[in-house]
Image (cartoon, rainbow, N blue to C red):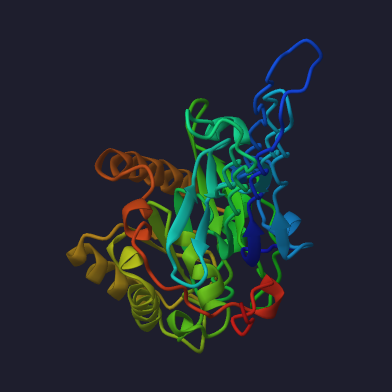
């Protein structure tokens, strides 16, 4: 099952208490205090696991707690440090505090780690409190409390090109043809119910990652259909490839393009500013609305937006599209930061309570 949002409670370990102890050995006169310090509590750490592509492994538990630190002991022996609790997540995961929306971690690289809850400090033993006027303290410091908070894990897939289109526009067929992805393909809408990634090989040394998301519908930016659930997965992409079906009897070509642009612009400023490419699919069919296709082509030429007429069975045209997309990605890499949403997402933005029951996130939960 594909899970891309989770609300969890995490709590770091409590620090161990300091020890009250006095040295008592034969032939050692006036043995003084020698209580050791408590150990530090374990941190809650989030780590990127390259083999993961979903948050599903974390769904089986709603509360995660790190181990506490050990108590100090006599002879100035410190307590053991509590082991860190490591939560493994896929690349592209963001962690926010639920109440404030504060970004705690933005994990984009394999093996990257971030501490989202620090363990409590260990308390000091009575050996620390000796002085010239108080040579036998009979007290020690308690260990510090751990941090406990509700957090939201949000997965935004890492890809170079994002496929956008209405249902049955040919997105899944295209990504199957040019990559190793194997999404479901059928002659009815909404065959794609979860995002999928495919690696597109340009040549022997170059490749890029393409993301296929479920088809969007009008009103997707307001949460209609699967809008809010999956539009965020293309926010990290560098190029958006808009696919338009010219054989759809219910929707003309140019209004389809305008509707797609409207949904992207309304969803977020990031999608509005991304570089876009338009491709009309299924051009090998007789039912293509040729006049409308040419009208859209003329409009996009004026707007300097790349336009392609493709068929998933015309490999020559597909190869041209792949090479051009790779060139655009390289240009964007030179002009844009490594993570296009890193700076914007670092702001404290309240979390939208628009997730479904399947995601494991219940906005009505009482904290």
Indicate the quadrant containing the N terminus: top left, top right, bottom left or bottom right: bottom right
Q: Which is nearer the eye, 202 or 137?
A: 137
Q: Is residue 115 left or right of residue 297?
A: right
User: In front here: 265 or 229?
Assistant: 229
- Count every numbered label the image shows and give the total: 0
Determine whether, in the image, residue 78 is placed left or right of residue 27.
Answer: left
Residue 181, can we see it?
A: yes
On screen, 152 above or below 21? below
Q: Is residue 353 above or below residue 349?
A: below
Q: Position of residue 22 (x, y in %)?
A: 71, 29
Residue for point 77% across, 62% down: 61
145 relative to 217, above or below = above
Tell which residue pokes out farthest to the right in this image: 26
Where, by quadrant of the figure, is residue 16 drawn?
top right
The x and y percentages for residue 266 are: 34, 78
Location of residue 275 with respect to 263 vertically, above or below: above
| Image position, residue 254 (x, y; %) | 34, 79
> Looking at the figure, which quarter contains the C terminus?
bottom right
Residue farthest along the top direction in this orientation: 27
Where in the figure is residue 303, as x and y percent of width and height?
20, 65
**Residue closest to the eye, 236 or 140:** 140
Q: Is residue 235 left or right of residue 153?
A: left
The outermost residue toward the left is 302
* Near-viewer residue (313 or 197): 197
């Amino acid at each position: 099952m594909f899970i891309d949002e989770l609300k969890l409670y995490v709590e770091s370990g409590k620090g161990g208490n300091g020890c009250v102890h006095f040295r008592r050995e034969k032939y050692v006169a006036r043995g003084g205090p020698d209580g050791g310090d408590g150990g530090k509590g374990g941190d809650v750490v989030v780590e990127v696991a390259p083999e993961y592509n979903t948050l599903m492994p974390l769904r089986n538990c709603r509360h995660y707690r790190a181990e506490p630190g050990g108590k100090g002991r006599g002879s100035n022996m410190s307590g053991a440090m509590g082991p860190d609790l490591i939560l493994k997540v896929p690349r592209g995961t963001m962690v926010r505090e639920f109440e404030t929306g504060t970004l705690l971690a933005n994990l984009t690289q394999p093996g990257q780690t971030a501490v989202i809850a620090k363990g409590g400090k260990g308390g000091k033993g009575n050996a620390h409190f000796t002085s010239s006027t108080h040579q036998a303290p009979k007290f020690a410091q308690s260990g510090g409390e751990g941090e406990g908070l509700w957090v939201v894990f949000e997965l935004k897939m890492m890809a170079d090109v994002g496929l956008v289109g209405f249902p049955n526009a040919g997105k899944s067929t295209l990504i199957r043809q040019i990559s190793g992805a194997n999404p479901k393909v059928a002659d009815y809408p909404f065959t794609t119910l979860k995002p999928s990634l495919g690696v597109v090989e340009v040549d022997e040394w170059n490749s890029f990652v393409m993301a296929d998301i479920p088809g969007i519908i009008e009103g997707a930016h307001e949460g209609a259909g699967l809008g809010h659930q999956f539009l965020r997965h293309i926010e990290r992409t560098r190029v958006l490839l808009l696919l338009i079906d010219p054989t759809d009897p219910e929707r003309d070509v140019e209004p389809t393009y305008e509707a797609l642009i409207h949904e992207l612009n309304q969803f977020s400023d990031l999608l509005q500013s991304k570089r876009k490419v338009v491709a009309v699919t299924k051009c090998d069919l007789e039912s293509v609305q040729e006049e409308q296709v040419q009208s859209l082509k003329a409009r996009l030429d004026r707007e300097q937006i790349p336009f392609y007429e493709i068929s998933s069975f015309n490999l020559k045209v597909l190869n041209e599209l792949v090479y051009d997309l790779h060139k655009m990605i390289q240009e964007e890499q030179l002009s844009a930061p490594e993570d296009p949403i890193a700076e914007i997402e670092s702001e404290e933005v309240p979390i939208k309570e628009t997730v479904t029951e399947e995601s494991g996130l219940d906005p009505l939960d009482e904290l």
